[in-house]
Each structure stands twice: as structure tokens, then as C-alpha cells.
Amino acid sequence: MDVMNEIKLDFNDRIEKVLSWKEWSVGDVAQDFDDKKLYTSLFHSIDSDTLNVTDDSMLNIFVLLGAKPDKSNEEMFNKFKFEDSAVPSGSFRRIDDTEEFLDQAIGHMIEFINLSTYIYLRLGYMKQKKRQRNMLKFLIVAAATMYNELYSIRGKIAFAYYFKKIIQNSDNLTKKITPYNKKSWKGEFAKYTEETKEDISFLLAGSDVAKPIPIANIVLVCGKMTDPDLLPLEERYFIESGIADLQKQDYNPIFITTFL
């Protein structure tokens, strides 16, 4: 018997509100990445009639994205800064309202999933299957750590599982998948994490300089750093990505996440 999971009633309204922050159009992976274009149809896969999903549906990712962040108002205010769309680019502000924080968290996840979809599909378009597998591994680890940072540690591994499935099946998001199994996926995810750490260490080869990985006009940057906002202070691995314009020597980061 299929297990039914409930997507929160107001989730669709929240997605529509957050998507309205930009004038999105449909993107083509044969061209350079454009942060005003959607390369995934995931966020158009939900409507007011889609409130219950079976455990073999990729749309379970919406159940996790609709969860309330497990953070106090004080933690929200002190730990996070968000770009303020109401003022010129480059301005940031802190917030301590749970509802507004969830809007921002979902907005960041939309940007992350959209960029990740582009990276995966672009490498497939370029017929670089080995790089595609390696980049997916990096992105899965980044997905889990971003969920941990913005939501809670609870659910981060499940989020990574559904994230992997939606990236791999972006052409058919209604496809049935193997239901999430915490025991088996936990071991697989631990392997991805360990291999990602090994790969980053290998890329650095003893250097303290972060390693950029170009993909079209996107750069994925991997390295190690000490994050002054996290205690105890210790060296952490990081993965970030953004749009690079080499001619203008300009780099616009879209996401960054750190992990031990």
C-alpha cells in the first residue's frame, strides 16, 4: 500500500509568490546560463490539486521544502543575511520573521535547484558523462548541507535523495521512483560525502587556493575555508557556484555551502 505524504496547503501560494520575484522564462541548456530563466519544470509541477503524494513520487521534495525552519528568531537574525530585492543590488539585510525566512529559504532552493539542473543537463548536452557524474555527486552533498543550513538537520538526507532524483529525471518528473529508504540511502550519501571530500582535497593538491571548475559560463568553486560565522572555528570544505564573465573579470555567486 502506498504511503501518502501531504504537501502543505499554502505551499503552492508561497512558490508562486517567490517565483514572482523574477520574470522567469524557459531556458535552453544549449546556451549559456541565464539566472532569469528556468531550466527545471519542477516548480510548475504543483497546483492546488496536488496536496497528497505517494512515497514513490519525486514531488515529496515539496513536503521537505514546505517544512518550517528549525531555527529560533534570534538564530535567523544573527546567522543569515539576505539580498534585499527592494533596494539596489548588493544590499543585504537580516530578518527574524519565520514566514519571511521561509520565503527566502525557498527562494534560495529554487535558485540552487535551477542552477544544478542546468549544470547536469549542460554536461549531458556536451556529452561529458564522467564530469556529469562527478558534478552530480558534488551537488548532492551541497543540497544536503544547504537544507541543513536553511531548514534543519532533520530531513537533509531525504532532501538529498529527492534532489538527486529530480536532477536525473528532469525530463519526466512524474516518473515513479524507488521510495526513500533512510537506511540504504544514508550509507550511499555518506559515500558521496567522503568521495567529495577526497575529490576536493585532490583538486587542491596541497594548495590553499580554491579550485574553479568551469562549465559554460558557470564556475563551480571547491576548496577549504574557516567560516567565522560557525563555531567552533575549524576548517571546512566548501562548494559554491555562480556566473562568471571572464572578459569583465566578473563573478556573480548563486550559492555557497560549507560542510565538515
Image (cartoon, rainbow, N blue to C red):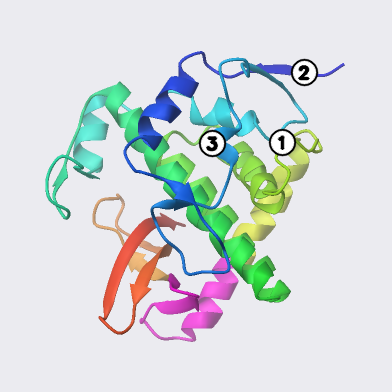
- SS for callout 1: helix
Residue drawn where x is 52% and y is 69% of the image: 31
Give the quadrant of the N terminus. Answer: top right
Label 1 CA crowd tier, 10 Å (few <14, some 14–19, many 20+): some
Mark 2 / mark 3, whichever is N-terminal: 2
Residue 59 percent coordinates (x, y): 65, 31
Instruction: Looking at the picture, tell me which residue is in the foreground, 251 or 191.
Output: 251
Report the residue marked by disc 1: 182
Residue 237 percent coordinates (x, y): 44, 64
Q: Which mark is residue 43?
A: 3
Q: Is residue 237 visible?
A: no
Mark 3 or 1, closer to the camera = 3
Disc 2 and disc 3 in contact, CB within 8 angstroms: no
State how far apart marks 3 and 1 are (Cα).
Answer: 25 Å
Residue 199 among magenta residues:
yes
Disc 3 marks a residue whose amino acid type is: Phe
Q: Tell me: 161 left or right of 231.
A: right
Disc 2 and disc 1 in contact, CB within 8 angstroms: no
Disc 2 marks a residue whose amino acid type is: Val
Mark 2 / mark 1, whichever is N-terminal: 2
